[in-house]
């Protein structure tokens, strides 16, 4: 029997980004037994495949023969109708990165900014979306609606796909791209794998740093009640302006206050375990997969932190700060799957718990309002983030009809109790530090913040291959719904004497835990009004609503539908065209009469089209055009203070922001000269109306630098990228090299952006809370022609290594370069604040070993061998103000895993 598969059967109808079988192979799975022939699974002979092609489900001994005809489509990158980059399980493993954000930084045009937020072609995370198995996720970060990708360990991710051109079946919030993470799926055979690693950091491990006690299970990332928010704050935090000494004494003191020096910070460690099992019940293939891991790491930063309000660059405050971060991440994945015929059902459950325990001490010789004396400031923080997600997906095929359905529920939480801050001033008379709590360089504050968000989403996609066309044409359509509900509270308090004056000596010269001890709080203070002693010296004054809204609730409901047509117009010429209608109602409401909320209720028609010309057996060209949007994120709209632990900076939202609108265009050439080998080149152009930008400002003359938000009238972004992937076989060398090859992967992205700014009115980042927008000419906030924040002109990634094609043995050098990028617009039109990422070199070695019937993998990693510093600065004529600069350590880690 001879079965002839034509081009029509190679172009499988689907409403997904790529067909499920292709995604299955990328994720390291085996496609369903009856999956139709797929380009990514069965490439033609000239792609380097064996001419004997066996289709799953056919018995080769029965004399059946399959003859494949049609154009060569050797892999997923080429087969899909859109521009995509794919990280397979093996690609992720080769980078050696511990989280998916680090692995994605190796993809063409992608960079990681801050704590795990991925920028695509210079556009920030607000212009991109992150999906898990095709469903959206809420973020545990108050500052953003998108989830930070550094909380996803690579051990639970099967593949990562980045789509850089928009298609109507994806959410309309698209500027740089969409990142779809696929979790590890049900295996085809049972396995059990355990592993662990240790890491040494040259600036942290066995070095000087700061710690504090906290709770009994801090080393596991879980608080055991020591940081519980006191009941009187929960009950009266929104209404009471002051709490008296008896209540203040109830707060946990030394456990969250006493900073301790540690001259031998521990080594970093990580442990993980995963298991899978599958079996047949009748005609149904059932399976499950489970994984769990935990890691504990330390990072110490010895930073220079300066700021200025002077056009000449004269430093206003000059701190030398040491911060020690202790990050503990625990995660678990539990998945179930069923496959029957051409149908597949998956139920995936994910749990991630990510905690950062931070201790900080800084001294300044220059500081406003300190009478010229040295200032010492101390912080102790606890940021606990948690994500729980459950998803149910179904993929069903009925001949030329396909139906994909998915539904998910996700909950994210962020608790930051006992954010403590102390500021002492050096007393030259007594030669000691003093904190009289009078606010003149001498103060103590405490904050409690909580965030809780629920996200429900559902989507159904229907595709039908139209039978009355001579060439393959697929009509697809679908409906999408999501409902995000967020609640956030932040209570800020300042310790003061009973009448707002100074507390007396000797209490004012005590260290923080003694300063706030019960004896100090309840001691008597002299009352000049009554000329008598006032019982209860220290009280807690509520600043919550004075610094913004103490509480806000936010919601985003989206209804969307789309229609899309994909087909072959002529021999080698195919096109995808679609339109999406998306209606969203976004609201932020506050408890404050002073700081109002906002509502954005808009609907858009969003068209997209991509044409692909396969003009040679191994070459093709693409043209793309689309219209998309970007909505302000909850935290950008909410008038509430928030401290970002990565940048060590305060942020404040702006309820006057509006949606951004984007026009996207791209042209691309692709040459697939051999299997898994290619050269691609592309040019892109984007026009953005009302792009949201971060703007630095000083709320008062003596306050610290803060970051707010506004939008520019418009901006343009354009550039190009080139990528090459090539293998060089070494078998001709013989001996050791018989099964080995050299691997070279290189990519370069050039991006240029320009803000258009003039007399147009835009909202000031400092709103007065009257309900009437404070508008200023855009030229007061933005320099005409300035680049967008977060955009580097040059991004370079290079991977060069040697690997064994018969067994696990790899040695890879990874080189990364990112040019300077703006992180904030300078306050009062001062020079922009610029980050200098620089050059970074990493080495990763992986070696498989069989011992006692078990398979072991040894992994050695050496990171940041160039010793590149982190530097964020403002450049003035002849001098620079170091906003935040510190050494990044060189790290070496050794890991081992065993597969049973």
Image (spheres, rainbow, N blue to C red):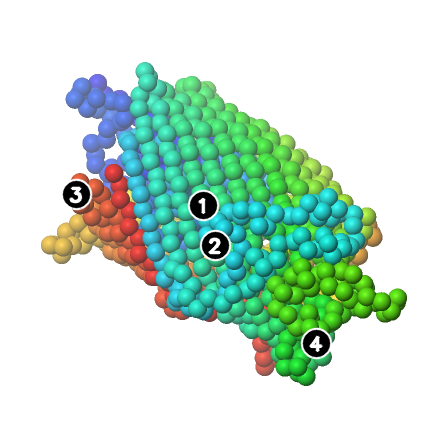
In the picture, the disc for residue 327 is 2
Q: Which residue is mark 4?
A: 370
State the residue at coordinates (68%, 45%). 231
In the image, taking residue 177 as reference, residue 757 lies left or right, namely right
Q: Residue 160 location, x and y as percent?
A: 42, 43
Q: Indicate which disc, 4 or 3, sits on the residue closer to the N terminus.
A: 4
Q: Residue 206 location, x and y as percent?
A: 39, 66
Q: Residues within 10 Å of mark 1 (few under 14, many from 20)?
A: many
State the residue at coordinates (45%, 45%). 330
Instruction: Measure how far apart labels 1 and 2 are at the Cα level.
Output: 10 Å
In the image, taking residue 616 as reference, residue 682 lies left or right, namely right
Instruction: Measure how far apart labels 3 and 1 are at the Cα level.
Output: 31 Å
For label 4, the SS is loop
In the image, taking residue 403 as reference, residue 92 lies left or right, namely left
Q: Residue 709 location, x and y as percent?
A: 68, 56
Q: Residue furthest top?
A: 282
Instruction: Measure how far apart labels 4 and 3 are at the Cα level.
Output: 68 Å
Q: Which residue is mark 3?
A: 852
State the residue at coordinates (33%, 58%). 893
For label 3, the SS is loop
Towards the viewer: 676 or 327:
327
Question: Residue 168 lies in what quarter of the image?
Answer: top right
Towards the viewer: 894 or 874:
894
Q: Indicate which disc, 4 or 2, sits on the residue closer to the N terminus.
A: 2
């Amino acid at each position: 029997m001879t079965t002839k598969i034509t081009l029509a059967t190679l172009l499988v109808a689907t409403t997904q980004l790529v067909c499920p079988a292709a995604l299955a192979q990328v994720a390291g799975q085996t496609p369903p037994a009856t999956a139709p022939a797929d380009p990514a699974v069965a490439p033609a002979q000239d792609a380097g495949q064996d001419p004997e092609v066996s289709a799953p489900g056919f018995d080769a001994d029965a004399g059946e023969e399959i003859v494949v005809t049609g154009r060569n489509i050797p892999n997923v990158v080429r087969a899909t109708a859109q521009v995509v980059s794919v990280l397979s399980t093996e690609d992720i493993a080769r980078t050696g990165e511990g989280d998916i954000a680090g692995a994605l930084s190796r993809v063409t045009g992608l960079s990681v900014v801050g704590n795990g937020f991925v920028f695509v072609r210079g556009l920030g995370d607000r212009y991109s979306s992150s999906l898990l198995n095709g469903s959206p996720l809420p973020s545990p970060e108050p500052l953003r609606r998108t989830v930070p990708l550094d909380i996803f360990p690579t051990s639970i991710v099967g593949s990562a796909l980045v789509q850089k051109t928009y298609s109507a079946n994806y959410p309309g919030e698209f500027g740089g791209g969409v990142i779809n993470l696929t979790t590890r799926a049900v295996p085809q055979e049972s396995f059990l794998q355990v592993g662990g690693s240790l890491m040494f950091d040259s600036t942290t491990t066995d070095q000087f740093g700061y710690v504090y006690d906290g709770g009994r299970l801090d080393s596991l990332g879980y608080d055991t009640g020591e940081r519980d928010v006191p009941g009187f704050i929960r009950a009266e935090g929104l209404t009471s302006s002051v709490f008296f000494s008896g209540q203040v004494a109830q707060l946990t003191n030394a456990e969250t206050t006493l900073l301790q020096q540690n001259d031998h910070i521990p080594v970093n460690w990580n442990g993980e375990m995963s298991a899978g099992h599958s079996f047949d019940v009748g005609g149904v293939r059932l399976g499950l997969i489970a994984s769990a891991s935990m890691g504990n790491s330390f990072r110490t930063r010895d930073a220079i932190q300066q700021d200025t309000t002077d056009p000449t660059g004269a430093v206003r405050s000059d701190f030398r700060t040491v911060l020690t971060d202790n990050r503990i991440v625990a995660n678990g994945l539990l998945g179930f799957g069923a496959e029957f015929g051409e149908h597949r059902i998956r139920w995936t459950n994910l749990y991630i718990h990510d905690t950062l325990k931070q201790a900080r001490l800084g001294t300044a010789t220059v500081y406003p309002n300190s009478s010229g004396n040295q200032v010492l400031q101390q912080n102790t923080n606890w940021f606990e983030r948690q994500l729980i997600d459950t998803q149910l997906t179904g993929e069903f095929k009925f001949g030329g009809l396909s139906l994909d359905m998915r539904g998910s529920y996700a909950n994210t939480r962020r608790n930051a109790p006992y954010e403590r801050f102390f500021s002492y001033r050096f007393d030259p008379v007594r030669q000691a530090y003093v904190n009289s709590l009078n606010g003149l360089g001498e103060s103590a504050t405490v904050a409690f913040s909580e965030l809780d968000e629920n996200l429900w989403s559902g989507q159904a996609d229907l595709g039908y291959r139209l039978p009355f066309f001579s060439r393959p044409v697929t009509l697809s359509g679908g409906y999408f719904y999501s409902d995000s509900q967020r609640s956030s509270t932040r209570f800020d308090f300042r310790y003061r004497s009973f009448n707002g004056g100074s507390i007396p000596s000797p209490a004012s010269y005590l260290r923080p835990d003694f300063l706030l001890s019960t004896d100090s709080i309840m001691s008597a203070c002299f009352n000049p009004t009554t000329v008598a002693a006032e019982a209860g010296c220290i009280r807690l004054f509520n600043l919550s609503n004075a610094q913004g809204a103490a509480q806000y609730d936010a919601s985003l409901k989206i209804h969307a539908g789309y229609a899309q047509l994909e087909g072959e117009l002529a021999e080698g010429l195919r096109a995808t065209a679609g339109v999406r209608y998306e209606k969203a109602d976004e609201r932020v409401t506050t408890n404050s009469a002073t700081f109002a909320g906002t509502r954005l209720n808009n609907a858009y028609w969003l068209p997209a089209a991509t044409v692909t010309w396969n003009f040679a057996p191994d070459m093709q060209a693409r043209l793309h055009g689309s219209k998309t949007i970007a909505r302000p994120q909850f935290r950008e709209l909410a008038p509430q203070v928030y401290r970002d632990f990565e940048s060590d900076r305060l942020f404040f939202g702006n309820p006057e922001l509006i949606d951004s609108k984007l026009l996207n265009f791209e042209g691309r050439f692709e040459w697939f000269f051999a299997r898994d080998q290619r050269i691609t080149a592309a040019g892109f152009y984007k026009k953005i109306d009302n792009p949201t930008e971060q703007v630095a400002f000083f709320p008062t003359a003596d306050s610290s630098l803060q970051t707010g938000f506004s939008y520019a009238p418009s901006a343009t972004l354009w550039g190009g990228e080139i990528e090459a992937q090539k293998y060089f076989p070494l078998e001709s060398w013989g001996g050791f090299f018989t099964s080995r090859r050299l691997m070279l992967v290189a990519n370069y992205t050039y991006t240029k952006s320009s803000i258009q700014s003039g007399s147009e009115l835009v909202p000031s980042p400092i709103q007065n809370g009257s309900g009437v927008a404070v508008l200023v000419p855009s030229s007061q906030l933005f320099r005409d022609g300035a680049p967008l924040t977060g955009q580097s002109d040059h991004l370079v990634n290079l991977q060069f290594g040697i690997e064994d094609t018969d067994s696990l043995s790899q040695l890879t050098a990874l080189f990364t370069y990112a040019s300077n990028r703006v992180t904030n617009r300078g306050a009062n039109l001062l020079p922009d604040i610029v980050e200098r990422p620089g050059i970074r070199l990493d080495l990763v070695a992986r070696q498989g070993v069989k011992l006692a019937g078990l398979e072991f993998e040894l992994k050695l990693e050496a990171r940041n061998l160039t010793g590149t510093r982190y530097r964020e600065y403002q450049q003035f004529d002849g001098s620079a103000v170091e906003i935040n600069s510190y050494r990044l350590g060189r790290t070496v880690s050794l890991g081992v895993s065993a597969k049973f």
